[in-house]
Amino acid sequence: MKFFVDTGDFNEIKDLSETGLLDGVTTNPSLVAKSGRNFKELIADICKVVPGPVSAEVAALDYEGMVAEGNVLSKIADNVVIKLPLTLAGLKACKHFSDAGIKTNVTLCFTPNQALLAAKVGATYISPFIGRLDDINLDGVELIENIRQIYDNYAFSTEILAASIRSPNHVTQVALAGADVATMPPAVIRKLADHPLTASGLEAFSKDWKATGQSIL
């Protein structure tokens, strides 16, 4: 499963990219607003440090506006992915970009039927928001499982990009459910490496090594 980071914080992206764990980046208008950066300049900077897909979302809600904005965003860098809302206008724009060979990420997916529509118009990625479903007492991981079955039934090439991930447990669950990608906040990626037994074991090893009085260098 590929790891994308979901943030508009350039320093966080650069730091995580240097670990070798990062496969791509997702952004949205809320994250860009939080960064305080110029949107197009931020996307350009991210694309310079992350060779993988970088999702940049259109702001328009109508088809013509989405196409116009998507054309501008796609010219920023070769690895820009145009992020579009899961509406009929967004799906129409997705078909336009798919036909032109431009990668797309259809976002705000909450049902298997929505995911089916996105696959039919050639979306590169579909972004089911599992955390937001959990917030209203629905099963977000079950949505991933259902989409996986539908896509496998018909050999759709659209990748399932599990979004709105809130915890390391979510990462485990979507990996087991067959998601192709998980996008998550920087803090969640870092938590994946944490375990109290790892920390206590390392502390004991370090203490024992120090007692030997030896040095590897």
Image (cartoon, rainbow, N blue to C red):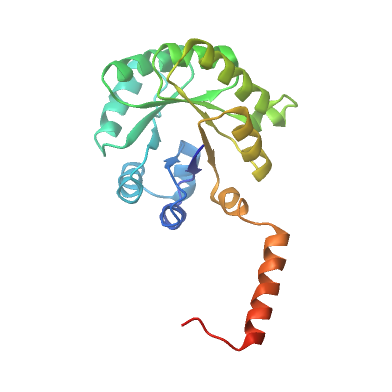
Residue that appears at 36% across and 47% down: 50
User: Measured from the top left, where is residue 182 in percent x and y?
Assistant: 54, 37
* Horizontal relation, residue 139 to residue 33: left or right: right
**Left or right: where 75 falls relative to 57:** left
Q: Nearer the viewer, residue 210 or 169?
A: 210
Vertical position of residue 147 compared to residue 12: above or below: above
Q: Is residue 1 above or below residue 21?
A: above
Q: Residue 201 sits in which quadrant?
A: bottom right
Which residue is more in the foreground, 10 or 190?
190
**Apparent side of residue 160 relative to residue 188 in the rendered image (left or right):** left
Report the front residue among 81 and 141. Answer: 141
As displayed, is residue 207 above or below residue 150? below
What is the x, y in percent for residue 60?
39, 25
Work out whether residue 170 or residue 163 is closer to the camera in this orientation and state it. 170
- Taking the spot 61% from the left edge, 38% from the top edge, the residue there is 165
Q: Residue at x 38, y 35 (%)?
A: 56
In percent of width and height, residue 154 lies at: 49, 10
